[in-house]
Image (cartoon, rainbow, N blue to C red):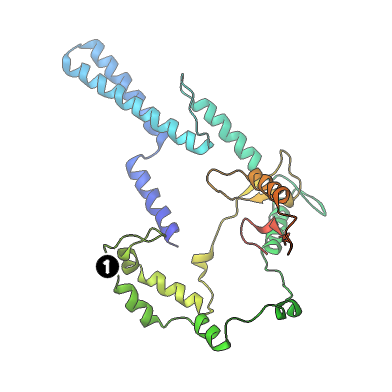
Amino acid sequence: MKLKRLKGVLRDWNKATFGNVFTMVEQAEEEVQDCEVAYEQSPIPELREALHKAKANHLKCLAIEEDFLSQQSGIKWLAEGDKNTGFYHNYIRKRRKKSTVLGILDGAWLTALDDIVASGVNFFKDLFIEDTISEEVELLDCIPSLVSSSENEMFMAVPALEEVRRVVFSLNKDSVAGPDGFNGHFFHNFWNLIAAVKHFMEGNHLHQSFTSTSIVLISKGDHPKAWKEYRPISFVQGRLIQDNILLAQELMHHIDKGKKKGNVMLNLDMAKAFDRLS
């Protein structure tokens, strides 16, 4: 909900500050042309200064346009030389074409938009449903109990709202931020958010405004034909998806196989790892 509100504020700020980037460039070009004509007709210092300002504004607008197109295309490098807007336009069109699902194999080859949408919704709805996990009671009986039932109830109990509020507002507003990056001032001002978290911890459902999301799919190959050939978007700074494969191979290779008590490795369902683990 907060991100949706922020998006609206940023959109209004963008319109008020920059407006239409491409229209701004065209207006700057026209201003330069008008100043050039005026200076040629009357080469006085005032018109020369106006021409210099118009050219500087034009260069600024071109830089904003190029930065905008760079962000749209996802390119993070900029080659020296001529303006790259044509390249960015072509790259954006290529990305949009690649991201468009024109057909999908779901038992039969689907090409109608409504059929593709329904197929995608059903696939990811089934993917994100929590699987039923059977508990091996006999295996758990082999683990010694170190916590009594009363202690477990105490540990699992949710603190009273007033108790949490008393602790939160006892924090110094200017205290040093903790590992999460938030100081006392944040928790004082966003007490309603903390109360909502406690409400969820008591077993209630989170409001849809907290759980709404947008699934963006990334193709695993050049020509995906089925939903399983797409992966939900995920990002870990400085790491590639292939790094996880290499890491698993290294762990298997270097595991201490000569250990007396042996080792245990779990084979997890990583198909859902980008949004949850089963």
Q: Work out which quarter of the rendered image holds the N terminus and state it.
A: bottom left
Residue 198: quarter of image: bottom left
Residue visible at 41% across and 58% down? 5
Depth order, front residue of 27/10: 10
Q: Residue at x 54, y 43 (%)?
A: 238
Q: Position of residue 131 (x, y in %)?
A: 71, 69
Q: Is residue 261 above or below residue 240?
A: below
Is residue 100 visible to us here?
no
The x and y percentages for residue 122 are 71, 61
Residue found at the very far bottom of the displayed protein: 150
- From the viewer's perspective, is 248 left or right of 160? right
Percent position of residue 183, x then y = 33, 62
- Residue 57: which quarter of the image? top left
User: In the orientation shown, which residue stands out farthest toward the left?
Assistant: 45
| Quarter location, residue 274 | bottom right
- Between 211 and 165, the one lying in front of the other is 165
Q: Which residue is mark 1?
A: 172
Image side of residue 15 versus residue 198, left or right: left
Q: Residue at x 62, y 34 (%)?
A: 94
SS category of the residue bearing label 1: loop
Under mark 1, the amino acid is Asn
Q: Going 34% across and 24% down the picture, which residue do you hit?
A: 30
Instruction: Look at the image and tell me in which quarter the C terminus lies.
Output: bottom right
Residue count near mark 1 (Cα–Cα under 10 Å), binned few <14, some 14–19, many ≥20: few
Q: Position of residue 263 (x, y in %)?
A: 72, 61
Residue placed most toward the observer, 214 or 233: 233
Residue 231, can we see it? yes
